[in-house]
Image: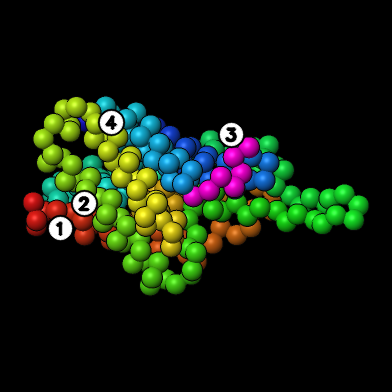
Amino acid sequence: MSNGDIFVGEVIGTAILILFGAGVCAAVTLRHSKARASGWIVIAFGWGFGVLAGAYTAAPLSGGHLNPAVTLGIAVDTGEWGKVWVYLLGQMVGAMLGAVLAYLVYLAQFQANVRSEGAAGGTAEEPTATLGIFSTIPEIRNPVANLITEIIATIALVLPVLAFGLTEGLGESGITVLIVSLLVVGLGLSLGGPTGYAINPARDLGPRIVHTFLPIPNKGTSDWGYAWIPVAGPLVGGALAGLLYNAAF
């Protein structure tokens, strides 16, 4: 695969992933969405379907990594580092593009994200915080625990992804991406509660950058003090998964 193909594939695939993922978070979160308050299960499946659509789209061009932790795990296992920077660049650009597209889809809802004064004698509604639509926020802010969660959850993603390559028939049948998508749903349901399961540095950092600059009314903070954890944790987890896979298989 050429550098150009890899870059284009990762931009398109990661943009689709974030469009679906940030889109489902917006659908569940924003006050004037028809899917408001539909819950965590909807979010987990929305992200899983984002992986399904993004990875299948990108696969012919780049293999559909869509995640620096996956790219790092593969590089640690194989020792092939020459194209890592192309993957990472495409993933970051795609993640920011996907966040902008999700914002545009829910533009009217974001613009309505203001305090509602209510009828006479009624109570005012607070604006809905928006960072959780774009990036992860820990339920309990404990840097050590949050980092451990992201490391373990990313190992639980990248190690199976690497092992799927050894499963006879999966690659030829084209079903690998579907299995990975279901894996992401399972991770969200099982391990997503503490931190929102970033498990992907580009997925968190790219949209967080976009959130900082988007003109969203009452958007609140972008929480840059926490931002290093969903970057460092998945990178460490991806590298450890690559080392473990290389040693065990």
Question: What residue type is disc 1 on?
Answer: Leu
Pinpoint residue 207: horizontal percent, then vertical percent.
49, 48
Pinpoint residue 233: horizontal percent, then vertical percent.
34, 61
Mark 2 or 3: the one toward you? 2
Check residue 105 in the rendering and tell me which mark sits there, or answer none.
3
Q: Which residues are magenta?
A: 34-40
Q: Which residue was labeled with disc 2? A: 159
In contact (CB < 8 Å): disc 4 and disc 2: no
Mark 1 or 4: the one toward you? 1
Observer able to see residue 210:
no
Question: What residue type is disc 2 on?
Answer: Leu
Q: Which residue was labeled with disc 4? A: 59
Q: Which residue was labeled with disc 1? A: 244
Question: What residue type is disc 4 on?
Answer: Ala
Observer able to see residue 169:
yes
**Magenta span includes 37:** yes
Classify 42 as above or below 6: below
Report the Cα–Cα distance between label 1 and label 3.
Answer: 41 Å
Question: What residue type is disc 3 on?
Answer: Val
Classify 224 as above or below 170: below
In contact (CB < 8 Å): disc 1 and disc 2: yes
Q: Residue at the location (32% across, 41% down)? A: 182
Q: Residue at the location (23% across, 28% down)? A: 174
Overall secondary structure of the magenta stretch?
A: loop
Report the Cα–Cα distance between label 1 and label 4.
Answer: 25 Å
